Each structure stands twice: as C-alpha cells, then as structure tokens.
Image (tube, rainbow, N blue to C red):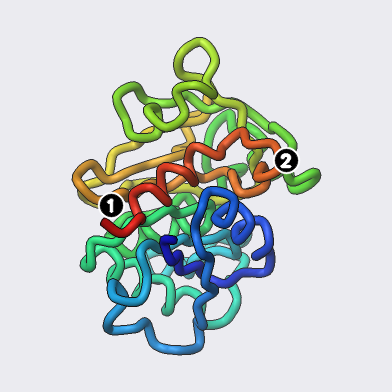
C-alpha cells in the first residue's frame, strides 16, 4: 500500500479519505519538524493541500491588500518539502494552495487577487457547499490530466469544477505546462511532463470522494506511487 505524506491543513478528512478509497495509506506530516532527509525511503508520494496565501515575498512581490497569510510555518515547510520531493523523484499531487506552493517553490509566480487583477474574472471563491460546481475548465488535449479524466469530460475537453480561491498561478515554474484553464484565462491545472507524476489542480477534487467525479486523479496518483 503506497504511503502518502499529506501536508497538514484544517480540512484533513476529505484528503485522507480520498487517498484511502483508492488504496493509499495517508500519513499527516508534522510541519513543525524538519523535512526528512530520507523522504523517499519513508513515503511513496506527497499530497499538498489547501490553505492560506503563500507569502508574496517568496516570489519577489509586495503583498496585495487581500493577502491572507497561511498558518505559521506552512510556507517554509511546504516549499522545502516540494523541492525535496521533486529532487527525490516522488509522485506529487498538489491541490489549490498546494499548486501555488509547488509553483513558487520551483521558481514561478502567482496572481495575488483574481477579482482585482484579472479582467472579466469569474467567481472563483464559492466556499459553500464545498462540492458546488462553480464554473467550467478547459483541459488541454494530450496532457496527463486529460488522460486521467477522459471519461469525465463533456465535449471532449470540458470539466465542471468547484472553486474557492482568490489566487492562482501567474507564471508557471520552469518545466511545467498548463493543463487546464478557466474561461477567464485563470490557470486551473499544471503538470510537469516526464517520468515522475507531478500534477497540480486549483479546484478541490477531494471534496468529491463520496461521488467520484475526480476519483481518477487520486487513482492516477496512487498508481504512480505504488512501490514496484
């Protein structure tokens, strides 16, 4: 059973259950402890979770008025974890803030506030209910994301997703491709082509573990993390 390291957050049960239901063993990390030097010998994959904003100083920007700091210690721990996981070649699945952390850790930048910085922005902040389908995203053909979700899309490349974020990836980190966008141009998913599974989405697939709309994302992650 793949051992999946999960970044702790305030809404762990859905992440943990999403991993369990596809055959993984979720293990919450201690963000107050150093990132293990032997990460790859302890875990088979890393799941990055949602939460507050990444400190804009970490990508060379001044804070926007809407800046909402994450829990103390999360930025430092998660950025170090992302770099260590990539170096170790571990499968990575990053969700919402997790996508933003992964991007910043590897040299990318963020849109700090979609409502005030994106012309014609959709409403990306629909907090309740957590599984409300807020808008569609357009999935790029030929991506790992499109392969995993091919049976879930309509008209070949459209997904309906939930949404509760006010930030997004601006410039993707080197080596990443954009694998989904919203109709307003906001980047909704990215991935890093290559042998390792490195996939990030801006919506919250973990909220659908009961109904399975995004189960293939977790299945693909766990399959990539399965020990040979």
**Can you name the residue that lies furthest to the top here?**
155
Q: Helix, strand or loop at disc 1? A: loop
Residue occupying the point 41% across, 61% down: 2
- Res. 173 mark: 1
Q: Residue 130 at x, y = what percent?
A: 74, 46
Q: Quadrant of the N terminus?
A: bottom left
Q: Earlier in the sequence, mark 2 or mark 1?
A: 2
How far apart in space, not on screen, are marks 2 and 1 (Cα)? 29 Å
Residue occupying the point 52% across, 27% down: 137
Tell me: 225 left or right of 33. left
Residue occupying the point 29% across, 39% down: 177
Residue 139 vs residue 16, the one in the foreground: 16
Q: Nearer the viewer, mark 2 or mark 1?
A: 2
**Total residue callouts:** 2
Q: Quadrant of the C terminus?
A: bottom left
Q: Helix, strand or loop at disc 2? A: loop
Q: Residue 37 at x, y = what percent?
A: 28, 84
**Can you name the residue that lies furthest to the bottom here?**
33
Q: Badge 1 local density, few (<14 within 10 Å), some, or many (20+)?
A: some
Residue occupying the point 43% across, 66% down: 3
Q: Determine which residue is flagged by label 2.
A: 131
Above-or-below relation of 205 to 141: below
Q: Badge 2 local density, few (<14 within 10 Å), some, or many (20+)?
A: some
């Amino acid at each position: 059973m793949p051992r999946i390291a999960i970044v702790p957050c305030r809404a762990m049960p859905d992440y943990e259950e999403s991993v369990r239901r596809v055959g993984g063993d979720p293990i919450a990390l201690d963000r107050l402890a150093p990132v293990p030097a032997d990460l790859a010998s302890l875990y088979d994959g890393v799941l990055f979770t949602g939460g507050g904003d990444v400190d804009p100083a970490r990508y060379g920007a001044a804070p926007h008025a809407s800046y909402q700091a994450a829990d103390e210690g999360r930025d430092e721990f998660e950025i170090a974890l992302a770099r260590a996981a990539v170096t170790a070649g571990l499968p990575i699945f990053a969700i919402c803030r997790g996508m933003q952390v992964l991007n910043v850790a590897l040299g990318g930048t963020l849109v700090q506030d979609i409502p005030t910085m994106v012309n014609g922005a959709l409403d990306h902040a629909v907090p309740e209910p957590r599984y409300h389908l807020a808008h569609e995203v357009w999935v790029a053909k030929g991506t790992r994301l499109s392969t995993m979700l091919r049976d879930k899309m309509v008209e070949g490349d459209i997904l309906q997703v939930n949404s509760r974020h006010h930030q997004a990836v601006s410039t993707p980190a080197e080596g990443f491709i954009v694998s989904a966008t919203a109709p307003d141009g906001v980047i909704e998913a990215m991935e890093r082509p290559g042998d390792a599974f490195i996939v990030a989405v801006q919506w919250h697939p973990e909220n659908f573990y009961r109904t399975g709309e995004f189960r293939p994302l977790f299945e693909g992650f766990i399959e990539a993390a399965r020990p040979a």
